[in-house]
Every structure is written in C-alpha cells, then in structure tokens.
Image (cartoon, helix red, strand yellow):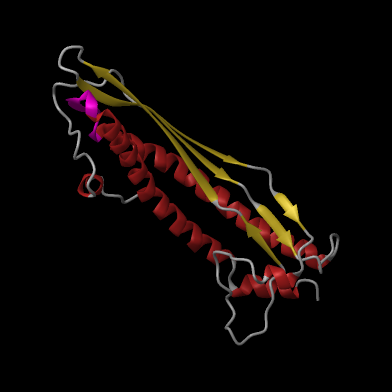
Amino acid sequence: MLGIDLLALSAAGFLELAQYNGGCQAQKAPEVSVVASTKDVRYNFTVPKSQLANRKIDTVSPYSHTENTYVGGLMEGEIQIRSNVNIQWATHPTTKETCFWYDKVNIQMEIDPTILVAREFPRGTCQHNEILNHEKKHVAVDRIIVKKYRKMMEDYLKKVLARVPVYGPVHAAKAPAVKKEMSDYIEKALDMVTEKMYAERRQRQQAVDNKNEYDRVSNACN
C-alpha cells in the first residue's frame, strides 16, 4: 500500500479558486497513463578511479572514514519523471461561467543509466568484470523500483482525480489561474508518490553497497 493521505492534498492549499460545484459536470472521465521506460545502458571505461571518487552518488561507503578505500566503478542516472496535464473546459455564452475538467494526464518515468568502471581495470580483466557486475545490480534496482511505482502512481492519480472530477463554475476571466491550480494539484500528487519512490530507491541502492558485497568484489580476483 502506498500509505498516502488523499486529504493531505486539499489541506496543502489546493482547490481554493475552483471548488467542485453541482452546476458543472465533467464530459468524460480523465484518461490517466503512466508509462515506464529504460534507455539502453551506456558504458564509460575511461575515467580514472581518482576522479570516480569525487563523483556524487546516492549511497555511502560501508567502511569507516578511517579505512583507505577507493571507488572502482559507479552507476550514474536518476529516475526522471515528466508530466503532461491536458485540461478541457466549457463556457456559458451569456454568463461566461466556465467549467473545467481533466481530459488526460500522462506521466513518463524513464531510467537513463550510465555505468562507469575505472580505467585502471581494463576490459576483460577479472576486476573489471566484477565491478561491472556489481554496478549492474544498481541498474536492476532502478528497474524494480520503476516497475513497482508505475502501477502505484497510476492508481493513486486515478483516486486523486476522482475526488475532484470538475472545477467550477467560475468566470472565464479566472481561467488561467484555475488551469494553473489544476496542474499544481496533479504535481502535488506526483510529488507525494515520488518522494516515497526516491526514499525506497535510496534504501535499496544502499543495500546493494553493503560491506559484504564490497569485500566480495575486492577479494574475488585474489
């Protein structure tokens, strides 16, 4: 279960301009689509390990700060989230009162990973292969996370939209403000899901970089 309170959205300050009113009716239920994709993994074997150690990563070393360790490889790439919200409306020709409703909400989740192995470990060597296989575990984690949260995000957005099937009526002059508020409402819902997703991702990625795994990779070719 996602464990997100639907009421938290309205409490966050949304829906102030255009509350639901019985005088408006949505022409159809909104279409919600969340699509997940993974770009082909890119590889970079040209960076020295001294530079890899300065790269920003999401996990921390399982070793104490007093131990002399180095980074032999890493996986770069975030889970990118892009949204597109399509809003429809109808305006009364005389009163200029306008009703708004969500037409389509499309979300794209994308992984764009790059695996780096330090150039001190040439391709074909045991060390290179062990480091490469370890970094592939990080890519696998991101794929698991995206697969899990794609469906959760889609289901949650449908519930969120069901709470506010229509906005209005409001005067047509307020249309820009209402459309912005409606888009912000979706973005807030997305933020609530993605915060949980990124937190779980950090936890799972850190679990990959445990001390036993680091020791295994370090000693595999001895």
Q: Tell me what residue is drawn at x 69 percent, y 56 percent.
A: 115
Q: Is residue 182 visible?
A: yes
Residue 166 among magenta residues:
yes
Residue 195 or residue 179, whichever sits in front: 179
105 over 135 or under it: above or below: above
Residue lying furthest bottom in this view? 66
113 over 206 or under it: above or below: above
In this image, 143 relative to 7: left or right?
right
In this image, 191 relative to 75: left or right?
left
49 over 140 or under it: above or below: below
In this image, 26 relative to 56: left or right?
left
Q: Position of residue 110 (x, y in %)?
A: 55, 43
* Magenta-drawn segment: 163-173
Q: Position of residue 129 (x, y in %)?
A: 78, 61
63 over 159 or under it: above or below: below
Q: Position of residue 83 (x, y in %)?
A: 45, 38
Q: Tell me what residue is drawn at x 58 percent, y 84 percent.
A: 65
Residue lying furthest top in this view? 93
Q: Tell me what residue is drawn at x 51 percent, y 44 percent.
A: 147
Q: How many marks?
A: 0
Residue 171 or residue 4, whichever sits in front: 171
Q: Is residue 1 visible?
A: no
Residue 61 among magenta residues:
no
The quarter of the picture where residue 54 lies is bottom right
Query: Quarter holding the C terminus?
Result: bottom right
In this image, 54 relative to 203: left or right?
right
Q: Tell me what residue is drawn at x 19 percent, y 18 percent.
A: 96
The quarter of the picture where residue 165 lies is top left
